[in-house]
Amino acid sequence: IAPVCEGAVQHIASRRFEIGGSDLTRLLAQELQQSNPSINLNIADVEKLKEQYACCAEDQRSYNEKRKACQVEKHTLPDGQ
C-alpha cells in the first residue's frame, strides 16, 4: 500500500501487508457485518462486492484501460467546491 499525493506515489511511505486474497475478503465481510448487523451476507456476496468495487492492474497499460472504462463521477463539497 502506498499513498498518492498530487498524482505521485510516495514510495518512501509504502507498506507491505502479509495478507491478501481470502484475508481481505474476510476483512471486508467483517466490516460489512459491523456496519449493518441485520444483513446476512455469505462469502459469495462479499466476493461479488469486492470484485465490483476493487480491481488490480497488472501493468500501466491495463490500468489505463480499466481507468478509461470507469464512469467519471463529479462531486460537490458542502461548501460548493
Image (tube, helix red, strand yellow):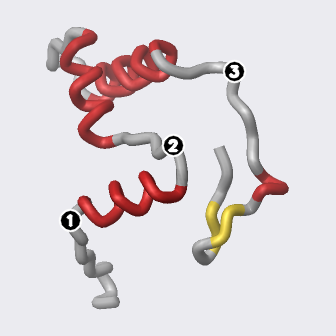
Quadrant in which the C terminus appears: bottom left
Viewer-proximal residue, 37 or 52?
52
Residue 56 tag number: none
Picture coordinates of residue 22, whole percent (x, y) = 46, 13
Query: Label 1 vs label 2: CA separation?
Result: 21 Å
Query: Amino acid type of disc 1?
Result: Gln
Q: Which residue is mark 1?
A: 71
Answer with left or right where residue 36 lies relative to residue 29: left
Query: Amino acid type of disc 3?
Result: Glu
Name the image quarter holding residue 63. bottom left
Q: Give the residue at the far right of this rendering.
A: 12
Residue 18 tag number: 3
Viewer-proximal residue, 70 or 27?
70
- Of callouts 1 and 3, the N-terminal one: 3
> What element does badge 2 sit on?
loop
Viewer-proximal residue, 61 or 70?
61
- Of callouts 3 and 2, the N-terminal one: 3
Q: Is residue 53 above or below residue 46?
A: below
Q: Which residue is mark 2?
A: 58
Instruction: Say which of marks 3 and 2 sits in front.
Output: 2
Picture coordinates of residue 27, whole percent (x, y) = 45, 20
Query: Label 1 vs label 3: CA separation?
Result: 32 Å
Query: Label 3 vs label 2: CA separation?
Result: 19 Å
- Of callouts 1 and 2, the N-terminal one: 2
